[in-house]
Image (cartoon, rainbow, N blue to C red):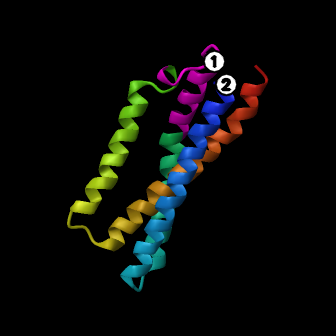
Amino acid sequence: MKKQYWVFLSGFTWLVVGISLLYRGLHFINDSKHEYALLFVAVGLLVGHAKSRFVLSKTVKRIVDRIAVLPEPVPISQVYPLSYCLLIGSMIALGVSLRFLPISILVRGTVDVAIGSALTSGALLFMVRIPALNRN
């Protein structure tokens, strides 16, 4: 498959997962009926922005740069390195573990908002790099 497809698919996946986590997190925070719920949303968004800017932006750059040098058609086995798969796996494990730990829905919602907003911002970083691939 074409390089642009893999970059778009990665960004689209991050966007869908990010939006679903944002929705779920906001739902949890709303259900908590806490008087400072808006503060928890703001903290989640701030942490998510920082994670996107300082961590996920580097991940996106590495993934797109890796895809850019692969010869077409690009097989799925060469698109994502093991370190990326481990990063995604650890994030999924963290999300699943939150279901079984005795954590309040307010904290769980804040974590979901943070991760969801980070993934949504990261998805946009994938999308803005697609035109550079078209020039090659």
In percent of the image, x 41 and y 86: which residue is there?
35
Q: Indicate the position of residue 115 as horizontal and vertical percent values.
A: 45, 54
> Taking 102 as reference, is 16 above or below it?
above
In percent of the image, x 50 and y 63: which residue is there?
22
Residue type beneath disc 2:
Lys
In the image, which residues are magenta? 57-77
Residue 8 image-quadrant placement: top right
> Taking 42 as reference, is 59 above or below it?
above
Dot label at residue 73 = 1
Q: Nearer the viewer, residue 1 or 61?
A: 1
Residue that label 2 marks: 2
Relative to 38, 129 lies left or right: right
CA distance for labels 2 and 1: 6 Å
Q: Main secondary structure of the magenta part?
A: helix
Q: What element does badge 1 sit on? A: loop
In percent of the image, x 55 and y 45: which residue is there?
13
Dot label at residue 30 = none
Q: Indicate the position of residue 36 as horizontal and vertical percent values.
A: 42, 81
Residue 57 image-quadrant placement: top right
Q: Indicate the position of residue 124 as horizontal and vertical percent values.
A: 64, 46
Q: Indicate the position of residue 98 as horizontal and vertical percent values.
A: 28, 59
